[in-house]
Image: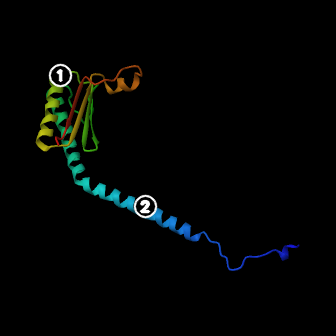
């Protein structure tokens, strides 16, 4: 028997294009659904985050004012020796972190400003952490335990 004598199938067409097309359609649909959900979530909280940003920047100015008034710092815009403070955004509010401020009168005044802002404007979350060491000490000394000596966490009541 030679190769030319082998039986052949006629009328049978084998394709995988239909399955491949269906998989592409499913992937495209799921991708489109993910994009729509992402946009919906971003739009639903877009205005809220803008309010938090304004309040965060206002809090930076108020902390700087407290530092100048209490003689801890002359000009926060140029930097204060051994004193650092940050107000960083987080989901639903912002963090405030201070380094090198050990005067409890100053920290109490900063904390009272934070609590007043939270009570007045209803910012969802404000977390404040105060460290007695400087930021430079916390970054350069590996064995230094970096635990805040003042911790304040405010959340919106349900």
Percent position of residue 51, x then y: 20, 49
Residue bearing the label numbered 2 = 30
Q: Quadrant of the N terminus?
A: bottom right
Secondary structure under badge 2?
helix
Q: Is residue 133 above or below residue 42?
A: above
- Where on the picture, by quarter, is residue 3? bottom right
Which is more toward the observer, 40 or 73? 40
- Label 1: few (<14), some (14–19) or many (≥20) C-alpha neighbours in 10 Å: few
From what the image shows, is residue 143 above or below residue 97?
above
> Splitting the image into 4 quarters, where does residue 137 fall?
top left
Residue linked to disc 1: 104
Q: Residue 89 location in percent, x, y?
A: 28, 42
Is disc 1 placed on a helix, strand or loop?
Answer: helix
Location of the C terminus by quadrant is top left
Seen at 13% across and 44% down, the residue is: 121
Q: Earlier in the sequence, mark 1 or mark 2?
A: 2
Q: Residue at x 22, y 21 (%)?
A: 102
Name which residue lies at 65% across and 72% down.
14
Of labels 1 and 2, the one closer to you: 2
Image position, residue 57 (x, y; %)? 21, 42
Q: Which mark is residue 144?
A: none
| Residue that sits furthest to the bottom in the current view | 11
Foreground pick, 98 / 52: 52
């Amino acid at each position: 028997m030679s190769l030319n004598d082998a039986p052949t199938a006629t009328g049978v067409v084998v394709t995988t294009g239909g399955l491949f097309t269906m998989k592409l359609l499913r992937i495209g649909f799921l991708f489109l659904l993910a994009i729509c959900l992402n946009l919906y979530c971003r739009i639903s909280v877009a205005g809220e985050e803008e309010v938090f940003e304004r309040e965060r920047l206002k809090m930076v100015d108020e902390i700087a004012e407290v530092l100048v008034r209490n003689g801890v710092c002359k000009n926060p815009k140029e930097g204060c020796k051994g004193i650092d403070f940050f107000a960083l955004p987080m989901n639903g509010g912002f963090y405030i972190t201070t380094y090198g401020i050990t005067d409890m009168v100053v920290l109490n005044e900063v904390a009272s400003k934070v609590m007043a802002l939270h009570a007045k404007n209803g910012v969802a979350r404000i977390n404040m952490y105060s460290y007695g060491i400087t930021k430079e000490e916390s970054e350069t000394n590996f064995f230094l335990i970096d635990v805040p000596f003042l911790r304040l966490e405010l959340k919106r009541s349900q």
